[in-house]
Every structure is written in structure tokens, then in C-alpha cells.
Image: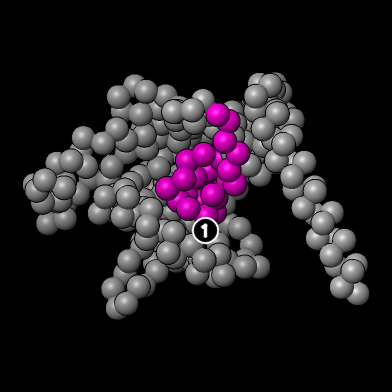
């Protein structure tokens, strides 16, 4: 299944996943302020029977410039700076602050402010480990060794019709609940590095500060309007 198809499927099942996780306690530790960490991204090794057919779609997919490394530093002030490295060597940076992701549009150079899409395991932009927001007690299956490390194993499957449409599995270190590996659709593999200290603040460049301030102003104005409407309704 190509990445576009996966994005469409995840967009379809995210409301169901969000409902399932409502009130569930997270089972995976997340990096906080003053930390630095990486995620290595690769393709799962297929068994011969699972190998993709050598057709035009598979060949085209192999030519896609896939991400191979995510590096994130979160300052003591809670602002994150991330960098995505692709197999071609190209890099893409983003900032995360106040639950938002700030990126520069490639074509226009305009700063875009978008919500952190934490529930979509294919979304790499954010301040938490990608692919882990779904991990909860509800999906814990057993304890097993992963790379000789005692781990809790989690498995999530969403059915659309009578066949599994989305499958995600995760191994989380039993000792400290740090993720070790996540596999999405037996295709995309995330390998999580250790969390290390980062003893600096991350300062947003002026264009990003201005974009965030404009968004906060709009949200504040909307909140005031809603409160005024609520008072009038009474």
C-alpha cells in the first residue's frame, strides 16, 4: 500500500481511534522540556510471500523520497525544533509550540501554523514520539523480548468491512515505558533513540513568532465572541 493510500485510511479511522482512547491512560513515556531525541525510519523487511509485486506502482513507490531520520530538540522553555532527513539527503525543519506545528511553505515561503496531528502515526512533525499516541492499556497484548530488552507488546487493528484495514504494533521498554520500535502496516518502521538532556531554550525566529501571535489573537477573539454569544443566549 502506498503512502497516499495509508494517509487516506488513517484519516478515515482517526475519529474511531480518538473515541476508543477517550479517557485511556497513556502507556508510553514522552520526551519533555529540555530533551533531545531521534527516530530512525525504514521499511520493514518483507518475507518472500509478502514482497510487493514488481509492478509500476511498486516501482514508482520505491522512487519516492522517503524520510529516514527525525531529530527533535525541545528547549527548557517547551518549544521544539525538529528536522526530518530524507533518503536523498534533503532536510526539512519545523517548530512545535503551544500544541501547534509551524512550518515554512516550500512554494510561497509563508509560515503555516497547523495542529499537531499526534494520533496519525505517519505524522512526523511534533514534540512527542511519532506513532505512539495510540499506545494504551487497551491494546497491550503481552510481555516479550525485543532486541533482548523486556518489553510490553501492543497491537492495534481497525476493521473496515470484514478485513483488517489498519495494523500497528509497538514494543515499549517495560522498565521505563520508553518506546523501542513501532511497525505500521508491516511497512514503515520507527526505531526510537534514547532521550538525552538538552540544556538550552529554543527561540522561535521572528516570522514564526508573528505567525503564532496572529493565531493566538484570532483564537482569543473567537473565544470572546463565543462567550458573548453564550451570555446573550442566557
Image position of 39 with respect to 83: above or below: below
- For the C terminus, the quadrant is bottom right
Mark 1 burial class by Cα count in 10 Å: few <14, some 14-19, many 20+: many
Dominant secondary structure of the residues highlighted in magenta in the image: loop
Q: Is residue 202 left or right of residue 172?
A: right
Q: Is residue 175 left or right of residue 220?
A: left
Rendered residue at 44%/28% (across/down): 107
- For the N terminus, the quadrant is bottom left
- Whether 126 is among the magenta residues is yes
Residue 126 occupies quadrant? top right
Image position of 26 with respect to 15: above or below: above
Asked whether residue 19 appears in the rendered view, the answer is yes
Rendered residue at 65%/28% (across/down): 208
Rendered residue at 87%/73% (across/down): 233
- Name the foreground residue: 9 vs 22: 9
| Image location (x, y in percent) of residue 44 | 27, 46
Q: How many marks?
A: 1
Q: Secondary structure at mark 1?
A: loop
| Image location (x, y in percent) of residue 60 | 18, 41
Specify the farthest residue to the left: 54
Residue extent of the magenta highlight? 110-133
- Name the foreground residue: 98 vs 215: 215
- Whether 177 is among the magenta residues is no
| Image location (x, y in percent) of residue 203 | 69, 22
| Image location (x, y in percent) of residue 78 | 71, 34
- Name the foreground residue: 30 vs 94: 94
> Circle 1 sits on which residue?
134
Rendered residue at 63%/42% (across/down): 100
Specify the farthest residue to the bottom: 162
Amino acid at each position: 500500500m502506498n503512502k497516499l493510500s495509508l494517509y487516506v485510511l488513517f484519516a478515515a479511522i482517526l475519529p474511531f481511534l480518538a473515541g476508543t482512547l477517550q479517557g485511556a491512560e497513556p502507556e508510553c513515556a514522552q520526551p519533555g522540556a529540555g530533551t533531545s531525541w531521534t527516530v530512525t525510519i525504514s521499511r520493514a523487511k518483507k518475507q518472500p510471500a509478502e514482497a510487493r509485486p514488481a509492478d509500476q506502482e511498486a516501482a514508482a513507490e520505491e522512487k519516492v523520497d522517503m524520510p529516514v531520520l527525525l531529530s527533535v530538540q525541545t528547549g527548557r522553555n517547551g518549544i521544539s525544533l525538529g528536522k526530518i532527513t530524507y533518503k536523498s539527503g534533503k532536510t526539512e525543519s519545523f517548530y512545535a509550540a503551544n500544541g501547534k506545528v509551524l512550518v515554512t511553505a516550500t512554494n510561497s515561503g509563508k509560515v503555516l501554523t497547523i495542529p499537531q496531528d499526534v494520533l496519525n502515526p505517519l505524522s512526523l512533525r511534533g514534540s512527542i514520539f511519532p506513532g505512539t499516541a495510540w499506545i494504551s492499556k487497551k491494546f497491550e497484548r503481552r510481555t516479550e523480548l525485543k532486541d533482548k530488552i523486556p518489553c510490553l507488546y501492543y497491537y492495534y487493528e481497525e476493521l473496515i468491512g470484514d478485513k483488517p484495514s489498519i495494523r500497528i504494533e509497538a514494543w515499549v521498554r517495560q522498565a521505563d515505558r520508553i518506546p523501542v520500535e513501532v511497525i505500521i502496516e508491516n511497512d514503515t518502521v520507527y526505531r526510537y533513540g534514547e532521550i538525552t538532556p538538552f540544556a538550552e531554550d529554543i527561540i522561535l525566529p521572528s516570522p514564526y513568532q508573528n505567525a503564532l501571535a496572529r493565531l493566538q489573537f484570532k483564537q482569543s477573539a473567537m473565544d470572546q465572541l463565543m462567550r458573548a454569544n453564550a451570555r446573550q443566549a442566557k
